[in-house]
Image (spheres, helix red, strand yellow):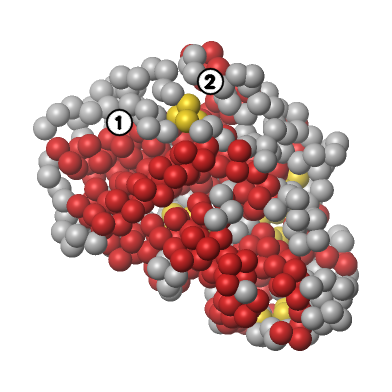
């Protein structure tokens, strides 16, 4: 067996999960030999940190879901960032996550493990690459993660998205081949289940088509996407100090609650009662009670509203949403409305509400505080409970779906993608306002380490408020 470099783990500023990968690499700075299973595990841990760690929190600040109140997070909320603020985020994405995923595919191929394992590594690479492209725009793609290439070429963002769609198609064919499942325990999310990974691949295709505003294609892909809560992809968490839920580590262990709070705007959407900071924003009505969801997500502390680290969203062992049934339903609702018409959008929104009425993705909740009754066409007509103004029925429904996505995908990167994707649709978009100035952030900055070392970095270097290609 060849010798491979494992690029592990993990930047201290992103918080480690070393117990999840114990034994992979006793010395992260040394060359080691390892099986594909160990490298795959490392790639998935790197991806958890990309999707649910500081990158996601930074995206949440830019999307108006978090507010920084001290130290560097106060600066982030005021959009006072430098290129060096993104060094660690870029490294985790490209080294801990993408490079390990590519190495896992190479080792599995060299050892003839089989197509299911290779398909999983390909889906993982597409997932990571699509996340990077969504945040940074033009970026290394085909040459990324290759040790022998010191200055990988930057590719056009739309070209990357097209390549990812092709890569996912190839991955799906491998996943459907029926042989070569990875060793039990080496794949953290779904233990190598090819049915789960095939559905995840289709939901990712739908997600990335949403990014590029190809709504008919997104709808068609989501029809083959995750079709039950049990087939959702979640990041596991444990009871050890360094394999706990990453938001638990940040808000409860690292006591960074003094730096970052849930924004008044985010809380106001689902907080019932007189303590709501912006009462007119509350989404509850005769068919909707958001009390259970608010209590699942949040709790009030001496410094403000925080994620629930005791019994809910950010508790120590809470799994973290990656690619889920609820997201797939809401893709079907929005993309269905945009490409198929009102009745399709309403039908899938009501499927989502039926799911939520049974508890949905929530846990440790009081069912008496849970109500998501189905909406009717009349609810979205002028004067209806979801259209108190004079929007068209289509726009009123679209506004509700976009707001539902904003809340349901809290803690993930997707709300930042949605706020940028819908920025020009003022009558329906979630009305996130800039914390300072007149513009919301449009991208992550290229890191200083990349600017210093890679001659292919785009020039002039775009600033925080320059839209990426898909959002121009």
Q: Which of the two residues, 84 or 458, is positioned nearer the viewer here?
A: 458
Q: Position of residue 451 (x, y in %)?
A: 55, 17
On the image, numbered disc 1 is attached to which residue?
A: 6
Q: Quadrant of residue 32?
A: top left
**Residue 9 visible, this orientation:** no
Q: Which quadrant, please, contains the C terminus?
A: top right
Q: Position of residue 51 (x, y in %)?
A: 51, 46
Looking at the image, residue 339 sits to the left or right of residue 290; the answer is left
Q: Which of the two residues, 462 or 441, is positioned nearer the viewer here?
A: 462
On the image, numbered disc 2 is attached to which residue?
A: 457
User: Residue, x 62% and y 66% (percent of image)?
Assistant: 338
User: Residue, x 24% and y 48% (percent of image)?
Assistant: 118
Above or below, comparing residue 442 to residue 405 in the picture: above
Looking at the image, residue 70 sits to the left or right of residue 238; the answer is right
**How far is disc 1 from disc 2 in space, using C-alphas?**
26 Å
Above or below, comparing residue 417 to residue 73 in the picture: below
């Amino acid at each position: 067996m060849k010798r491979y470099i494992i690029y592990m783990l993990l930047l201290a500023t992103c918080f480690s999960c070393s117990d999840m990968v114990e034994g992979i690499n006793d010395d992260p700075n040394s060359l080691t030999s390892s099986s594909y299973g160990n490298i795959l595990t490392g790639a998935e841990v790197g991806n958890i940190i990309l999707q649910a760690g500081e990158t996601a929190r930074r995206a949440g600040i830019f999307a108006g879901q978090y507010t920084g109140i001290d130290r560097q997070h106060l600066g982030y909320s005021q959009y006072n960032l430098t290129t060096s603020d993104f060094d660690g985020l870029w490294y985790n994405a490209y080294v801990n996550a993408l490079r390990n995923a590519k190495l896992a595919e190479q080792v599995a191929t060299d050892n003839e493990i089989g197509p299911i394992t290779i398909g999983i590594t390909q889906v993982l690479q597409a997932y990571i690459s699509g996340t990077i492209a969504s945040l940074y725009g033009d970026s290394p793609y085909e040459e990324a993660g290759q040790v022998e290439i010191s200055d990988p070429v930057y590719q056009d963002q739309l070209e990357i998205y097209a390549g990812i769609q092709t890569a996912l198609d190839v991955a799906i064919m491998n996943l459907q081949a029926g042989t070569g499942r990875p060793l039990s325990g080496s794949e953290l999310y779904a233990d190598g289940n090819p049915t789960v990974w095939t559905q995840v691949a289709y939901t990712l295709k739908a997600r990335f088509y949403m990014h590029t505003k190809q709504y008919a294609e997104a709808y068609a892909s989501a029809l083959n996407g995750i079709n039950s809560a049990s087939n959702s992809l979640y990041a596991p968490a444990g009871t050890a100090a360094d394999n706990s839920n990453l938001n638990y580590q940040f808000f409860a262990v690292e006591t960074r609650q003094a730096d970052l709070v849930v924004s008044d705007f985010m809380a106001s959407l689902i907080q019932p009662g007189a303590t709501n900071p912006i009462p007119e924003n509350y989404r509850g009505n005769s068919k909707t009670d958001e009390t259970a969801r608010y209590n699942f997500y949040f709790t009030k502390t001496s410094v403000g509203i925080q994620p629930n680290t005791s019994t809910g969203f950010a508790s120590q062992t809470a799994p973290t949403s990656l690619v889920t049934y609820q997201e797939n339903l809401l893709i079907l609702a929005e993309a269905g409305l945009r490409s198929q018409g009102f009745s399709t959008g309403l039908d899938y929104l009501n499927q989502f509400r039926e799911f939520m009425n049974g508890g949905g993705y929530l846990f440790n909740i009081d069912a008496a505080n849970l109500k998501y009754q189905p909406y009717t066409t009349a609810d979205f007509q002028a004067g209806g409970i979801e259209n108190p103004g004079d929007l068209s029925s289509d726009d009123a429904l679209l506004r509700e779906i976009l707001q539902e996505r904003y809340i349901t995908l809290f803690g993930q990167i997707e709300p930042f993608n949605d706020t940028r994707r819908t920025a020009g649709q003022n009558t329906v978009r979630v009305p996130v306002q800039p914390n300072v100035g007149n513009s919301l952030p449009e991208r992550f900055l290229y890191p200083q380490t990349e600017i210093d070392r890679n001659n292919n970095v785009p020039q002039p270097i775009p600033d925080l408020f320059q839209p990426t290609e898909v959002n121009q």
